[in-house]
Structure formats: C-alpha cells, structure tokens
Amino acid sequence: MNNRIQPVILCGGTGTHLWPLSRQAYPKQFLRLLGSESLIQATARRNSGPTLKRPLLMTNVEHRFIAQEQLAEIGIEPSLIALEPLRRDTALPVAIAALMTADESPDALLALLPADHSIPDAAGFAATLDTAANVARQGRIVLLAHGASRPSPAFGYVRVAAETPKEKRSGRKRTSTSTHGPRAVESFVEKPSAQHAARYLKSGAWLWHTGIVVAQAGTLVTAFRKHAPGILESARNALAEAHLDLGFLRLGRQAFEDARDISFDRAILERAEALACIELPGAWSDLGGWGDVAQASPADAHGNASQDPECIISEGASNCYVHGDGRCVALVGVKNVLVVATRDALLVADKGQADRVGTVVDRLVAEGRDEVVRHKRVYRPWGWYEELNRNHRFQVKCLMVKPGAQLSLQRHFHRSEHWVVVRGTVEVTIGEEQSIVSENQSVYIPLATRHRLANPGMIPAMLIEIQSGSYLGEDDIQRFDDRYGRQNET
C-alpha cells in the first residue's frame, strides 16, 4: 500500500476568464459547469480508488469551508486541507506538498492535479496515471500532455523525443510525436508568445502540457533545491510557521509574503532534466474560458449548447452557448454568441472574443466593483445568505442556516436587524436572553447588542433578515465567539 499515489489537488486559482459566474469568493473550481458535480468534486472523484491515497488539498484560506463541504458532499475525506494565506502561483504550494510528503517518505509518489479541468474519460485517465507512476518511480518528473488544437499562448508546450531508445536500436521510424506511451522531453516552454505558439502548432512536434505532473516527493525536492532554492526555503518556513486550526493546516503568512510569485512550470519544468511525457487519451480541457466550456458542453442540431438546454429558446440561432442561471434565454437570429447570466451581471460576447473577458474583470477590479468579488448568494460555513434588495439605509437578505450550525456571537455598531423565520426553528440569543423562534415568528436585534443565531433542528432553517442603519457593510461586525475560527475575518 506504500506504493499508492498521493493526489495533490491545487485549488487556489480564481478563474477570472469565467466571469461573471466565477468570482473571487466563489471561483471556477467550485462551479458546476459540466454536470451535477463541481470541477473540484469531479477531480477528487477521478483521483480516488485503490491505487490512490486520500487527497491533499492546497487552497486559499478564504475557500476552506467551500472546499471541505464540497468534498463531504461526495463522500471523499481529504487527508489534509492546507491553507494558503495569500494567493501565490503554483511553485510554492507544490514545494510545500513535496516537503510535507518527502519528510515522511522521499519515494512517495505525488500526482499534482489542477482542480478545474475537464477529463471525461476517467478510465483512460486512471490508466495513464498508473503508467506515469511507473515512470516516476525511476526518478523522473512525468508530465501529462495533450494534443494542441490551436496556437494558444496560455499553455505550456512540450516537445517530446520522436523515438524511444528501443526504436532507435531497431531502426524503426516514427512519423509523429503523438503517442500515449512515455517519451523523453526534449524541450518545455511555458506560455510562449502567440507567434511561437503558432509555430509550435504548425510544426506538429509539440503538445500542450495539461498541468498534471507525477513524481516522487524526493525528486521534486531535489529539483527545487537545484533550480529554485528560494522557493524551497519559503516552503520550509511556511511549514515551520504552520499550525492546525479546526482540522485545517494554516501555513505561515510571512513565508508567503516573502516568497517569489512564480509558477511551478517556470520555476522547475523549464529547467529540470530527465523530464518524461505521456499523452493523455481522449478529450481534455482546462476550461480556461467560456469558449472552452461551450466546446465541452453537449450541443443541439444547430450547435447551441447549455448546461440547462431547457433555458434556451432558439429562433434561427446557431453555434451559441448559454448559461442562464435558471432564466429563460431567447436567441433570435444570432450566431457564435456567448450569453452568461447571473443575478447581478450579464455577459454577452462573440465566441471568438471570449478571451477578452479577463480584460473586463481587470476593469471591474480597477473600479472596485463588487460584481467581481462575490455573488448575490454568499456561502458561509453555517449556510448562506442572499441579497434580495438594498438601499443606502436598508438591506433585505434571505438566510439559510444548516441543521446543527450556528452563526458567531457578534454585534454591529451601525445597524439593527429584524429576523423573520419562514422555515424551520431557530435558537436566538439577544444579550443574555435565549429564545426559540419558529415559522412565522420574528425577533428584533437592537443596534450594538450581542446576538447569535443557531439552528438546533433537523432541517435547514430559512429566514428573512432586514437590516437598517447608516452603514450596511459586511465589515461592520465584532465577533466574540465563533466555532469556525473567524474572529478576525469579515
């Protein structure tokens, strides 16, 4: 059982090119884009089985409860969820995972896995992963690649040897570098210019790097020690400063602040020796933008696709993609259009211009717009709240509190609140008094009064919350006690 692979799921990204569905508070990897499961759930399920250990998750501290809950929904318990205090590119989290594993067993195998990719052929992927593991046991870093279909500068490009040593000795010639067997890597280039990407595609000699890597922990540590010793030192410091909190491993913040922000591909793969490559069979997509999501989604006879086909009414429309968020979307006489609707934002784009969504996000960030940060529905470890209406002096929300969950003991300095229970039964603490509030009953929480809401029942509780006051921001909160360790968070 010591030969089992340790999946390391890297889920710290934001997926800005999938705005408005992907937001900073609820990014791409947690979205249900291609079915009933989110991308991280599909990744975890695809990487579970008798030859694999329980996954190690590397995620941002802001998303810890979402990641934990989504894996619990599908019955997968991670071995550990390590929390990144700041957003950093992949080199540092990979180095941390390698060090954590190598301290226990340098020969242990790691599979580095992006959390937000689409790989429909789970059986083919599992077979490829086993092959990669056998090659990695020889002390090599194994990349999983896929055939390039367009000259995109968004990928790493892998040039593999055209012949194996055995083929060279036999005199047999290969007519293509495309292969599902292991090959030595002649060159690796991370995110080349558009001009170079076009040249690579035209040559037919290069593959896309999927971001999936298999290697022994000790092999990775050695590679970092040689090619990125500063990153390795930051990883050691992050672990030295780490501590457990409610079962999560909080990594050291100072180490992250001091670390160079660089990808694993640039720090290691562009420089490492003895790289091997295996081409992944079947379809693969990194779902890097809405065009990729559209291509991966089933379409009707006119090329129109949607996760929920019933939301589309088409009159002479073709080759369109719609994410209606439950809305009915009518397409009349349009072609090659993307429509993505949420409660507070609408994206309409030409399919050929989908990569410009990132520029829109940059503008929203520069303007300080909330639409890039969070949805109307905001998830919390106790449940969620959804904004229904808002003015400069009042705000109306719907709250869902999970069975057995409770909000923090808190108070607000600029607003009072009314709670109306519309489903279930809740326990309310106001000052020193506790009471049970049932459906069609309400309570009032005066300004600056300590209060708490809990659900002692067996079903989710639903409430309407009416806030009124001079300031309604989420940072108007003082926590006195919180079972989720959020005293210093908004």
Image (cartoon, rainbow, N blue to C red):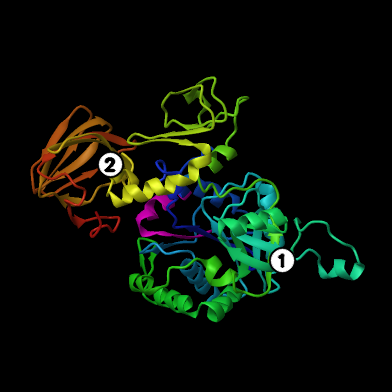
Q: In which quarter of the image is residue 19?
A: top left
Q: Say left or right for 13 vs 283.
A: left
Would you name the residue on which mark 1 appears? 134
Nearer to us of marks 1 and 2 is 1
Would you name the residue on which mark 2 appears? 456
Q: Give the range drawn in magenta.
A: 55-72
Callout 1: SS: helix
Q: Can residue 323 be seen in this view?
A: yes
Callout 2: SS: loop
Which of disc 2 and disc 1 is earlier in sequence?
Answer: 1
Quick one: label 2, few (<14), some, or many (20+) residues within 10 Å? some
Give the numbered dot on residue 451. none
- Location of the N terminus by quadrant is bottom right
x then y, percent, for residue 144: 65, 59
- For the residue pair 268 and 119, the one nearer the viewer reads as 268
User: Cα distance, mark 1 to mark 2?
Assistant: 51 Å
| In the image, residue 56 lies in the stretch drawn in magenta | yes
